[in-house]
C-alpha cells in the first residue's frame, strides 16, 4: 500500500501543536477578558515564567516571548504524543479517549510539576476558584490534548504494517 503524501509525522506534530496553542491562547483571553484582564497579559503571564514580574512591564517583547514559549510547549506536547502513538497503537486507534486522557496528563504535569518551578508571577494559587480550576482542566483536556490526538489521527501515517 503506497504511503499517503498528505500524511507525515512532522505535519501531525505541527498541526496538532498550532491548533492546541491557538485554542489554549484564545481560551484564557476570553475567560480572563470577561473578568477585566487585557489580552496582552495572557502571553505576558506565560513570559513571567521566565522573566518573573518584569514580564508585565516589558511590553511587546514579553508578549512575543510568551507566545513563542507557548508555541514551543505545544510543540513539545504534540511531539511526545505523535511519537508515542507510533509505538502505542491505542493512542491512534482510540483518538478521542487518548486525547482526553492526554489532556488530563498535560494538566497534571504542567500545574503540579512544571509551573511550580518557574518564575510565574503571580504565583499559582494552590486553591483557585472553582471556575478557574474547571476552565484550566477543561482547556487542557478539550483544547490541547484532544486536538493533538485528532491531528495525529488525521495527519500521521499509520504505524500499522499491512498484512498483504
Image: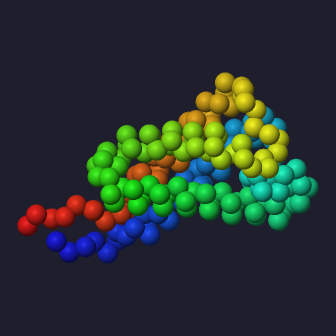
Q: Residue at x 40, y 67 (%)?
A: 9
Q: Residue at x 65, y 47 (%)?
A: 114
Q: Residue at x 49, y 47 (%)?
A: 145
Residue 50: image location, x then y, percent: 78, 57
Residue 43: image location, x then y, percent: 75, 54
Left or right: where does residue 113 sit relative to residue 106? right
* On screen, residue 6 above or below 79: below
Left or right: where does residue 140 sit relative to residue 91? right
* On screen, residue 22 above or below 143: below
Let me know if residue 21 appears in the view.
yes
Quadrant (top left, top right, bottom left, bottom right) of the N terminus: bottom left
Q: Nearer the viewer, residue 60 or 161?
A: 161
Let me know if residue 153 appears in the view.
no
Q: Quadrant of residue 81?
A: bottom left
Quadrant (top left, top right, bottom left, bottom right) of the C terminus: bottom left
Which residue lies most toward the left here? Answer: 164
Residue 42: image location, x then y, percent: 75, 49
Left or right: where does residue 150 sit relative to residue 49? left
Q: Quadrant of residue 112?
A: top right
Residue 85: image location, x then y, percent: 36, 55
Q: Quadrant of residue 157?
A: bottom left
Q: How is the image coloured?
A: rainbow
Q: Residue at x 53, y 48 (%)?
A: 144
Number of numbered discs:
0
Amino acid at each position: 500500500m503506497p504511503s499517503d503524501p498528505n500524511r507525515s509525522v512532522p505535519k501531525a506534530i505541527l498541526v496538532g501543536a498550532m491548533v492546541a496553542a491557538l485554542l489554549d491562547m484564545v481560551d484564557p483571553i476570553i475567560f480572563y477578558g470577561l473578568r477585566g484582564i487585557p489580552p496582552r497579559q495572557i502571553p505576558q503571564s506565560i513570559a513571567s515564567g521566565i522573566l518573573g514580574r518584569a514580564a508585565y512591564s516589558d511590553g511587546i517583547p514579553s508578549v512575543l516571548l510568551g507566545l513563542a514559549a507557548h508555541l514551543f510547549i505545544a510543540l513539545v506536547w504534540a511531539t511526545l504524543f505523535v511519537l508515542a502513538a507510533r509505538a502505542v497503537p491505542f493512542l491512534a486507534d482510540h483518538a478521542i479517549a487518548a486525547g482526553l486522557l492526554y489532556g488530563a496528563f498535560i494538566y497534571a504535569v504542567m500545574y503540579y510539576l512544571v509551573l511550580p518551578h518557574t518564575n510565574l508571577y503571580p504565583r499559582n494559587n494552590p486553591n483557585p476558584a472553582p471556575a478557574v480550576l474547571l476552565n484550566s482542566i477543561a482547556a487542557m483536556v478539550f483544547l490541547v490534548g484532544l486536538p493533538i490526538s485528532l491531528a495525529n489521527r488525521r495527519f500521521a501515517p499509520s504505524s500499522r504494517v499491512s498484512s498483504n
